Image (tube, rainbow, N blue to C red):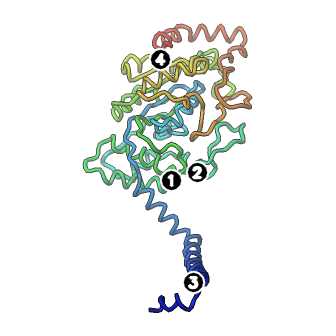
């Protein structure tokens, strides 16, 4: 009745003005409550992320070998491919050290499982962003909320009726990629999770545990010519690699592990040359796309972090993006005596590894 009377005593223009007034007043109250109530905002985010979490149950592709051999580069080449969940940093689920495959006691609680697997580095990356190499100022935002990750994990494993060891790791990957709020590669059907952990493939017990969890998993190891590897390693960590004989013994241990893993696990293990990855990038990435049964995509040719171009993780001066061809010439910094010692200590086993690498 009143609404009908208003039609006669108020002009259409006046009625629109009153309507806008009350609509704006109501909207202002709504916005004020939303902007003021930070706790409510967090609760809504928390609820939505758990409610719409997508399961990550695909197998793991573990990139692993001694440091300074191209593991970071390969993980950044996989980054952004629409059929992969690419872990953006080193996978540090290892416990008690990152290169020890974690042992999960199925008789303990989900809270204990998560505590074992949780990557402490996430806390630093969330607050300070991601930067590869202290010599670079370029920092990338990495918004993965640790407490949200934990709650997604607990919610996921609580939904499993009969828990298996694989479910614990699937729960962790589910929690990681769902709590990573600004992940630019969330959508699409994924075939694998890809991740780099240096030296984890060196230990036989690690590989046994890895394939127990991921019988459908893959291991990719990169062998770098020791003449190119040693100058890079020495420059990167002088305290660790300055003694050439000790450093080469570590390189040899790594090479022996590659031979053992390839001979034992066959087609589930792939060994590639670092120098081939650098100088024949497209051919190598096309091969690896076939190895993982994913479509070749040009994004596999550019190192990225969360689909953003990133500079190389190098011990030498760099001022551009992309693949660094100069990394295959580090041997030029060695003297004659060092070259002779490297040939003597590593020549035979290097040839054995080369007999098992991918041939392009």
Q: Is residue 271 visible?
A: yes
Asked if disc 2 and disc 1 are in contact, CB closer than 8 Å, the reply is yes
Q: Which residue bears the numbered disc 2?
A: 126
Q: Is residue 183 left or right of residue 208?
A: right
Compared to residue 150, the image places residue 283 above or below, namely above
| Quarter of the view holding residue 167 | top left
Residue extending farthest to the left is 162
Q: Earlier in the sequence, mark 2 or mark 1?
A: 2
Label ID, residue 146: 1
Q: Nearer the viewer, mark 2 or mark 4?
A: 2
Q: Nearer the viewer, mark 1 or mark 3?
A: 3
Quick one: 306 or 135, which is closer to the camera?
306
Q: Which residue bears the numbered disc 3?
A: 15
| Quarter of the view holding residue 298 | top right
Q: Which residue bears the numbered disc 4?
A: 256
Q: Earlier in the sequence, mark 4 or mark 1?
A: 1
Real-space Cα separation, disc 1 to disc 3, in angstroms: 51 Å
Q: Residues within 10 Å of mark 3 (few under 14, many from 20)?
A: some
Report x, y in % for residue 315. Answer: 69, 29
């Amino acid at each position: 009745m009143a609404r009908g009377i208003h039609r006669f005593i108020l002009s259409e223009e006046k009625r629109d003005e009153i309507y806008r007034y009350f609509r704006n007043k109501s909207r202002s109250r709504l916005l004020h409550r939303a902007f003021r109530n930070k706790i409510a905002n967090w609760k809504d985010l928390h609820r939505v992320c758990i409610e719409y979490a997508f399961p990550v149950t695909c197998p793991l592709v573990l990139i692993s070998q001694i440091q300074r051999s191209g593991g970071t580069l390969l993980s950044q080449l996989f980054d952004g491919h629409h059929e992969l969940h690419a872990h953006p940093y080193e996978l540090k689920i290892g416990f008690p050290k990152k290169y020890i495959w974690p042992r999960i006691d199925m008789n303990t609680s989900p809270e204990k499982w998560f505590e074992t697997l949780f990557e402490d580095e996430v806390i630093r990356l969330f607050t300070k962003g991601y930067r590869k190499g202290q010599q670079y100022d370029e920092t990338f935002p990495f918004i993965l909320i640790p407490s949200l990750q934990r709650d997604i994990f607990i919610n996921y494993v609580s939904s499993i009726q009969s828990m298996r060891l694989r479910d614990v790791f699937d729960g962790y990957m589910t929690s990681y990629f769902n709590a990573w709020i600004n992940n630019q590669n969330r959508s699409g059907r994924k075939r694998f999770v890809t991740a780099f952990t240096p030296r984890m493939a060196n230990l036989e017990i690690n590989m046994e545990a890895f394939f127990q969890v991921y019988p459908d998993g893959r291991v990719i190891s990169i062998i770098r010519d020791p003449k190119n590897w040693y100058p890079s390693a020495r420059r990167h960590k002088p305290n660790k690699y300055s003694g050439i004989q000790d450093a080469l013994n570590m390189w040899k241990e790594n090479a022996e592990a590659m031979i053992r893993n390839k001979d034992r696990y066959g087609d589930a293990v792939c060994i590639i040359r670092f120098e081939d990855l650098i100088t024949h990038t497209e051919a190598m990435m096309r091969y690896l796309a076939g190895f993982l049964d994913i479509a070749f995509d040009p994004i596999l040719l550019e190192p990225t972090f969360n689909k953003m171009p990133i500079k190389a993780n190098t011990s030498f001066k760099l001022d551009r993006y992309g693949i660094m061809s100069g990394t295959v010439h580090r041997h030029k910094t060695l003297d004659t005596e060092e070259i002779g010692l490297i040939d003597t200590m590593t020549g035979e086993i290097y040839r054995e590894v080369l007999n098992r690498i991918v041939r392009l």
